[in-house]
Structures are given as structure tokens and as C-alpha cells.
Image (cartoon, rainbow, N blue to C red):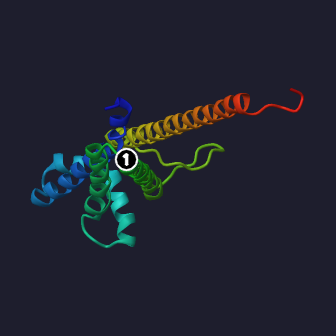
Amino acid sequence: MNRLFKLQFLGPFAVFTATLCAELAALALQYAPSSELLWYINLRVFGIFQRSASALSYLVPVDGFQFFGVALPIFALACIGLAARSRLPFTVATHLSVVYAGLLVFSWQAGVPTLTQASFGAMAVPSGVGLYVMATILGTCLLSFAVTHLLYFLAVGKEVRDLVRALSRMVRRFDHAKGFGFRSDAD
């Protein structure tokens, strides 16, 4: 199987893994609410998921929807695409993972108080490990998205080349048949 084809799996996998870890961290915090380590992990490492979960809760007020309703279906589509070696499930999964990564970035920007410096506009910048988690998710999703489009353009190029070859064969056959069977009035 083409390495680029497998590389499309990276974005949906990162979304699934990070969302699963965030859900597990929140669940562990429910069982050990006095743990400083779990509070740090929940607030600093996976804080982006808390903000996006609150944004999603306005649309769908279901606990765990971020994992079961968003990340798991995206990952399942990517797994189906990998198992069936089909481009369509991968295309849908990579596009949805980029949309979800965009939602994470948007919810981070919308949920943090901002500071204005000089004449620049206000922008919230995450700090610490949360920045790395967000950058990893966004980077892998964009990489998968780019690979999906690259493979699409390569497939379209192959189809165009095949069409041009078929048309040129038809023109050669027509010219060949014209030369043997038909003579002009000048002959």
C-alpha cells in the first residue's frame, strides 16, 4: 500500500488519541479529585478539550459527545478507509478531523481572556503543554488533509493522462482508416 495513503491515517488517529486521553483524564479526575497531577493534566495539557466540550454542549448536551460523537466516528471512518483501501472514507475522515481541529483552535481563542499589545489585535495564545497538544493535533490533521488532496490530484492527473492517451489512439485509428479506405478526388 502506498505510504502516502497510510499517512492520511495520522490526523484522525491523533484526534482520536488526544480526545480519548482527555476523556480518560477527566474520568480519572472524578475518581481522584484531590490529585494535583490529574488537575494539572486536565487543566494544562487537555484544557483545549474542556473549552471545546463546553462549546459543543450548546449544540448537543450529551456527556462524552466530543469523544463518542466526533472523535470516534472520524477514527472509525479512517479505519474503514484503511481496511478497505478506499479513498472516500479517508477523504471524509481527514476533512472532518481538520474541521474538528479548527473547532479546538476556535474554542481556545474564544474561551481565553485576551491581552492587547501595541497596535496589534487581541489574540489568545495557549501556554505550556496545551500548546504542544494543540499544535500536534492541528499539524497532523493538516498533514493528513494535504496528503489527501495530493493523492486526489495525482489520481486526477492519471485519469487525464489515460483520457489523452485514449483520445490520441482514437485519432490515430481514424487517420489510419482514412489513409487506407478513402481517396480524395485529386487521385
**Which of the two residues, 30 or 147, is positioned nearer the viewer here?**
147
Please identify the quadrant where the C terminus is shown: top right
Q: Note whether 101 is above or below 148 in the view shown.
A: below
Displayed quadrant of residue 165: top right
Closer to us: 127 or 171: 171
> Which residue type carries mark 1?
Phe
Give the residue displayed 89% in from the left and 28% down from the top. 186
The residue singled out by tag 1 in the image is 90
- Residue 68 lies, in percent from the top left, at 25, 61
Residue shown at 43% from the left, 58% from the top: 111
Q: Horizontal and vertical percent for residue 95?
A: 44, 50
Side of 187 where 177 appears, left or right: left
Above or below residue 92? Residue 186 is above
Q: Which residue lies furthest to the left in this view?
A: 31
Q: Position of residue 183 (x, y in %)?
A: 80, 31
- Count of labels shown? 1
Circle 1 packing at 10 Å, graded few (<14), some (14-19), many (20+), is many
| Residue at 31%, 32% in the rendered image | 1
Q: Which of 168 and 93 is in front in this view?
A: 168
State the residue in front, 171 or 182.
182
